[in-house]
Amino acid sequence: MSRIVEYMEEQQRRETFISVLQYLLDCDEIEDERAQGITRQIIGEGTLENLSPKQIYRYEQDVLHLVEVWCDGHCEGTIDIEDLENAYMRDTELGGRYCQLCMYDIENQD
């Protein structure tokens, strides 16, 4: 794979990550005020690289589990960051957060 393609894919994942963080803030999924501030910093800077050790700890305690989400379906995997916002939006409707594969299976049950 070319470096340009790798760069573009990394850029897309970063933008998706920032979008998910903004969604979590907008929907009040992040309860701790310090973690909300850290999340706003990450969104503003577009990176986690500038966080202090204390901020990283707070992020890991209060935000990471909202970004690295296990699928509630049969696959026993995590939900890809690209699908995470949709999984959160459909949580109430489906009674859980599901990856694309499990969501497809749920929607196509006979």
Image: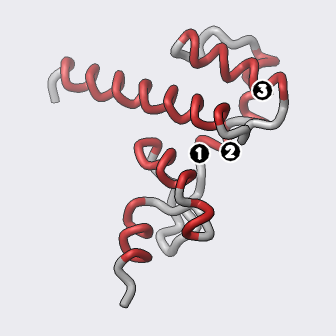
| Image side of residue 76 versus residue 4, left or right | right
Pointer 1 and pointer 2: residues touching (CB < 8 Å)?
yes
Which residue in the structure is indicated by mark 2?
65
Q: Residues within 10 Å of mark 1 (few under 14, many from 20)?
A: few
- What amino acid is labelled 2 in the image? His
x then y, percent, for residue 34: 83, 22
Quarter residue 72 falls in: bottom right
The numbered mark, 3 or 1, whose residue comes first in the sequence reads: 3
Q: Secondary structure at mark 2?
A: helix
- What amino acid is labelled 3 in the image? Ala
In this view, the mark in front (3 or 1): 3
In this view, the mark in front (3 or 2): 3
Q: Secondary structure at mark 3?
A: helix
Q: Residues within 10 Å of mark 3 (few under 14, many from 20)?
A: many
The numbered mark, 3 or 2, whose residue comes first in the sequence reads: 3
Quarter residue 7 falls in: top left
Which residue in the structure is indicated by mark 3?
35
x then y, percent, for residue 46: 52, 15
